[in-house]
Amino acid sequence: MNESMHKFMRVGIIHFMVYPETMRGDGPIAETVRKIALDDYFDAIEVTWIRDDRVRAQVKKILDTAHMSVAFGGQPMLLTSDLNVNDLNEEKRLKAVETLKKGIDQAYELGAEGFGFLSGRYDESRKEEAYHALLKSTRELCDYAKSKGSLRIVHEIFDCDIDKKSLIGPAELAKRYAEDIRKDYDNFGLMVDLSHIPMLRVTTEEAILPIKDYIVHAHMGNCVIKDPKLPAYGDLHPRFGFPDSENDVDQLVEYLRVLKNIGFLNEKNPPIVSFEVKPFGDEDPDLVVANAKRVLNIAWSRV
């Protein structure tokens, strides 16, 4: 397109993926957030938990000063602690919910507009029980967020049988889930991720069209799934064009076209659409960011 992409979306980046040493809530958080905030290519940033209150205050000041939109990723709080919001053990389910509530508190502190999370693993023979456990947890999170303000609770759709092996999952079940939650909560939505679409073995349209009315957030990324023996196999979010990977310019063009055609990318209320890319091995994170920006620039010119 000839028009600026920034008219249709707020381009973001997931801080804790491009700088994975910060994923557990510590490490060089403030200095790497500042590096992103200095780059006016980015309108938005996604951060996760920050254990140190003082560092969290620093990050808040940086993002306010830089005039950036903020989203909060609760996913690492679950994944690094082996917690599951659809755990059939009630004590463990509640621990997962309470952990995410602490993340919601931090999201409000940082001025985030959305809070992302994911469903966990499940036993196929007890899938319906896991689904109802997920509904219960999601309602508790939506209730808690709404009691404190206008933060939106956003479930990210993952693979169901390759890496994260999450309950949500396939578009049909994601649609049922969103319909069930939206009956009572208008502060809920779904997040799609280009990197997870190949892992669900569907086309972009098959992944997006059934849930188009519930999508509120999107990620752009890549994956390797051709052979489990490959070093970057699974949900590792390597850079675009990584050897033996699934996504590059052509796939991003198709993804953006579908998102634009359904009205998700729009001028009236541009959504956050973030890169989820991670350095592989000893790759320089700043070069991985440069790669993503180049790919998006080319892709947008073809949308």
Image: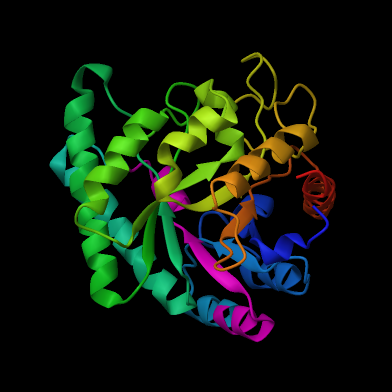
Identify whether 39 is placed above or below 225: below
**Quadrant in which the C terminus appears:** top right
Give x and y (percent) for residue 273: 61, 55
Give x and y (percent) for residue 281: 75, 37
Identify whether 246 is placed above or below 31: above
Give x and y (percent) for residue 264: 54, 53
Residue pictured at 73% horizontal, 39% vertical: 253
Residue pictured at 28% horizontal, 40% vertical: 177
> Does the image show residue 111?
yes
Residue pictured at 48% horizontal, 76% vertical: 110
Magenta region includes residue 74: yes
Q: Is residue 90 left or right of residue 176?
A: left
> Does the image show residue 235?
no
Per the rendered image, the range of residues in magenta is 60-83
Magenta region includes residue 267: no
What color scheme is it? rainbow
Please state which of residues 152 and 122 is positioned toward the viewer in this rendering.
152
Residue 237 occupies quadrant: top right
| Label tally | 0
Give x and y (percent) for residue 17: 62, 50
Identify whether 87 is placed above or below 95: above
Q: Is residue 157 left or right of residue 193?
A: left
